[in-house]
């Protein structure tokens, strides 16, 4: 059980984030944004295995690589053709789907679902390849209470809207807590391991007041089950880190293990950062420090800086949050 992630794209160029959630019995793959050239860092098999694509917003540097993704996957069937983003995502993706010539598609069948993440509801549209993606089929909206948008067997995804003079979504992936049997305790109670432990761990299969091995399941669970908290990674990019954003973000990413955060500017360019609704490395490091995260990965650094200036940008962050780093593979 682990989360593996990789920032795609080079320093000063377009970036994206690839996340793998490995539960031990299955691997799910998520892509956050899709800047130009980013998918070249993945094998074709990895691109074809991406289950969900999440967009922060649709400035070109975040979607310019989408053609590469869609070219490989447009005809795939299955229910992993899922795209998410801020309000307006369905409309923008519909234009993307329709912006190619489709005339040999009749025998191919694929369905794509695109969701607008609103504050109180998630609106989803379905697009069909046999129709050349012509019709946006509206699906029933899902009421949204809180930040949760996706609740899978092994992990959840939450989304928070931030201000980039347009809505920019931040995302957090969290593995669910795993409950393991304390084998020493099991032996001490004179119980034998066996198939009964599978349903014992599952609250749906065995309610707390059911009897198991001569005891109440709830009481035995309290004695035998040991929690292993899941891994987590947050993806934050393109927004103004003002007091309003800080107040929302601090508690949300508090306890998050990895934070991958845009760091467009150096401290001296704070004015530029504010004007363009972006962040400085020092601001990001302060957020990470106040929220108590374990690992801070800075990415989406402005192309205006040369290599030495990027080193200084990282040093500014490390002065506040020593564990700040650039992505592996940037060779900085
Ligand atoms: Zn932007
Ligand atoms: Zn950007």
Image: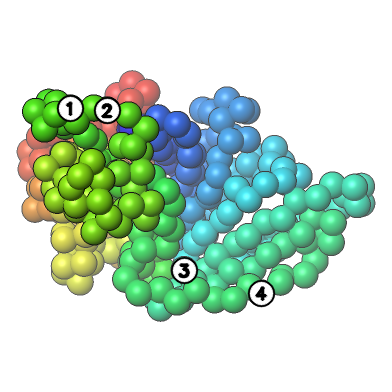
Residue 284 appears anywhere in the view: no
Whether pointer 1 and pointer 2 mark residues with C-beta atoms closer than 8 Å, the reply is yes
Instruction: Point out the tag, 1 or 2, that comes first from the N-terminus.
Output: 1
Q: Which residue is mark 4?
A: 138
In the depicted view, which residue is nearer to us: 313 or 208? 208
Instruction: Point out the tag, 3 or 2, that comes first from the N-terminus.
Output: 3
> Residue visible at 24% across and 57% down?
208
Q: Residue 183, labelled with which disc?
A: 1
User: Alpha-carbon distance for marks 4 and 3?
Assistant: 14 Å
Judged from this view, the residue extending furthest toward the front is 214
Q: Tell us which disc is closer to us: 1 or 4.
A: 1
User: Alpha-carbon distance for marks 1 and 2?
Assistant: 8 Å
Whether pointer 3 and pointer 1 mark residues with C-beta atoms closer than 8 Å, the reply is no
User: Looking at the picture, how far across and down is residue 155, in whole percent?
Assistant: 37, 48
* Label 1 packing within 10 angstroms: few (<14), some (14-19), many (20+): some
Quadrant of the rendered image containing residue 149: bottom left
Instruction: Point out the tag, 4 or 3, that comes first from the N-terminus.
Output: 3
Q: Which residue is mark 2?
A: 193
Instruction: Point out the tag, 1 or 4, that comes first from the N-terminus.
Output: 4
Instruction: Point out the tag, 3 or 1, that comes first from the N-terminus.
Output: 3
Q: Tell us which disc is closer to us: 4 or 3.
A: 4
In the depicted view, which residue is nearer to us: 181 or 70? 181
User: Alpha-carbon distance for marks 2 and 4?
Assistant: 49 Å
């Amino acid at each position: 059980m682990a989360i593996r992630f990789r920032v795609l794209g080079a320093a000063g160029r377009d970036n994206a984030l690839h996340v793998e959630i490995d539960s031990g019995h299955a691997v799910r793959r998520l892509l956050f944004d899709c800047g130009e050239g980013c998918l070249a860092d993945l094998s074709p098999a990895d691109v074809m295995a991406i289950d969900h694509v999440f967009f922060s917003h649709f400035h070109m540097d975040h979607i310019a690589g989408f053609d590469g993704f869609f070219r490989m996957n447009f005809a795939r069937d299955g229910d992993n053709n899922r795209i998410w983003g801020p309000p307006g995502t369905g409309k923008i993706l519909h234009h993307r789907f329709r912006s190619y010539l489709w005339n040999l598609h009749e025998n191919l069948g694929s369905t794509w679902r695109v969701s607008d993440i609103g504050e109180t509801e998630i609106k989803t549209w379905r697009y069909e390849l046999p129709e050349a993606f012509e019709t946006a089929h509206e699906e029933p909206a899902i009421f949204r209470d809180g930040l949760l948008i996706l609740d899978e067997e092994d992990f959840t995804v939450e989304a928070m809207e931030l201000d980039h003079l347009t809505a920019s979504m931040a995302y957090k992936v969290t593995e669910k807590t795993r409950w393991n049997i304390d084998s020493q305790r099991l032996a001490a109670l004179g119980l034998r391991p066996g198939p009964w432990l599978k349903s014992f761990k599952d609250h749906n299969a065995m309610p707390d007041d059911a009897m198991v091995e001569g005891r109440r399941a709830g009481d035995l669970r309290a004695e035998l089950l040991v929690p292993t908290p899941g891994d987590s990674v947050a993806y934050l990019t393109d927004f103004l880190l003002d007091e309003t954003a800080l107040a929302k973000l601090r508690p949300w990413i508090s306890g998050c293990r990895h934070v991958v955060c845009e760091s467009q500017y150096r401290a001296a360019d704070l004015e530029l950062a504010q004007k363009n609704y972006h962040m400085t490395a020092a601001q990001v490091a302060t957020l990470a420090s106040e929220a108590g995260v374990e690992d801070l990965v800075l990415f989406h650094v402005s192309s205006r800086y040369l290599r030495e200036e990027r080193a200084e940008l990282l040093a500014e962050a490390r002065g506040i949050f020593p564990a700040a780093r650039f992505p592996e593979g940037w060779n900085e």
